[in-house]
Amino acid sequence: AAGVIQSPRHLIKEKRETATLKCYPIPRHDTVYWYQQGPGQDPQFLISFYEKMQSDKGSIPDRFSAQQFSDYHSELNMSSLELGDSALYFCASSSSGGARTDTQYFGPGTRLTVL
Amino acid sequence: AQSVTQPDIHITVSEGASLELRCNYSYGATPYLFWYVQSPGQGLQLLLKYFSGDTLVQGIKGFEAEFKRSQSSFNLRKPSVHWSDAAEYFCAVGGTKYQAGTALIFGKGTTLSVSS
């Protein structure tokens, strides 16, 4: 079965640079989520989109922005990168359907290293 | 505020022995509950979920979990552990109100080691 696709899988950046992470949801899923997982930590919710509109917002820094496009893929843009941004970034997708069954399925993650 | 507690940071179980990982949640109503597993450097794989109905839910890889409202718990069990089950296990809670895109709140995770 098709899964969530994230690119790139690994990314190395210098401090103060920018990074763009991409997420392609499972086909026919209309909702995407972004999570950040620091080393040895649990995933922390950043932001989500439903039908291209922001749905929920967590602890996303102002330096980060995201959007969902008409084909439902999403991009997380990160600017002025800091050492503390080094983490595994997960995208998840779900289908809202007509009932509350929006189970989130996670991608393999993008490992961002900021030097 | 919603929260999830996994009291055990690290558990070691002998191969073939039974397993129970604990999860307690704090929420105003019956939440949607999930267990995910993460192998080192990998993504999160859904093991099972509870939305409503039968409080004993079956998942993949022989795992099951029981929702106990009176104890605000959703413990994960497996009758016989295999070496390949060694991984990090996360319990998570989702919202109950109908809103697509509601965040999952994760527990801190339990690392499972399997000894031979």
Image: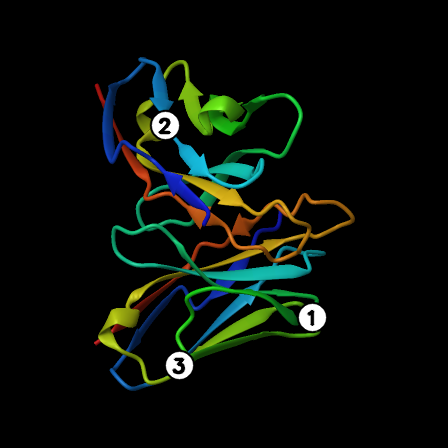
N-terminal-most mark, 1 or 3:
3
Residue type at the position of mark 2 = Arg
Query: Where is residue B96 drawn, in percent x and y?
Result: 62, 44
Would you say the residues marked 1 and 3 are in contact, meaning their CB atoms lie under 8 Å apart? no
**Disc number lying in front (1 or 3):** 3
- The amino acid pointed to by label 3 is Arg
Above or below, B47 relative to A18: above
Q: Name the colouring of the figure.
A: rainbow
- Asked whether, in this view, residue B6 is left or right of residue B95, the answer is left
On what subunit does the disc labeled 2 rest?
Answer: B
Q: What's the distance in space between the residues labelled 1 and 3, CA to CA?
A: 25 Å
- C-alpha distance separating marks 3 and 2: 37 Å
Q: Judge left or right: residue B12 versus residue A72.
A: left
What is the spatial separation of the Cα atoms under label 1 and label 2, in whole angstroms? 40 Å
Q: Tell me the element at label 3.
A: loop
Residue B12 in sight here = yes
Q: Residues within 10 Å of mark 1 (few under 14, many from 20)?
A: few
Residue B22, labelled with which disc?
Answer: 2
Give me the disc on residue A71.
Answer: 1
Q: Is residue B39 left or right of residue A72?
A: left
> Label 3 lies in what chain?
A
Amino acid type at image mark 1: Asp
Residue shown at 75%/45% (left/top)?
A99
Query: Does residue B68 appear in the picture of this structure?
Result: no
Which type of secondary structure does the marked residue at label 1 adopt? loop
Q: For the residue carrying disc 3, how many other residues have a C-alpha within 10 Å: few (<14), some (14-19), or many (20+)?
A: few
Q: Quadrant of the C terminus of chain B?
A: top left
**Label placed on residue A63:** 3
Q: Residue at x 72, y 56 (%)?
A: A28
> Compared with residue B101, is residue A84 higher up or lower down, i.e. above or below?
below
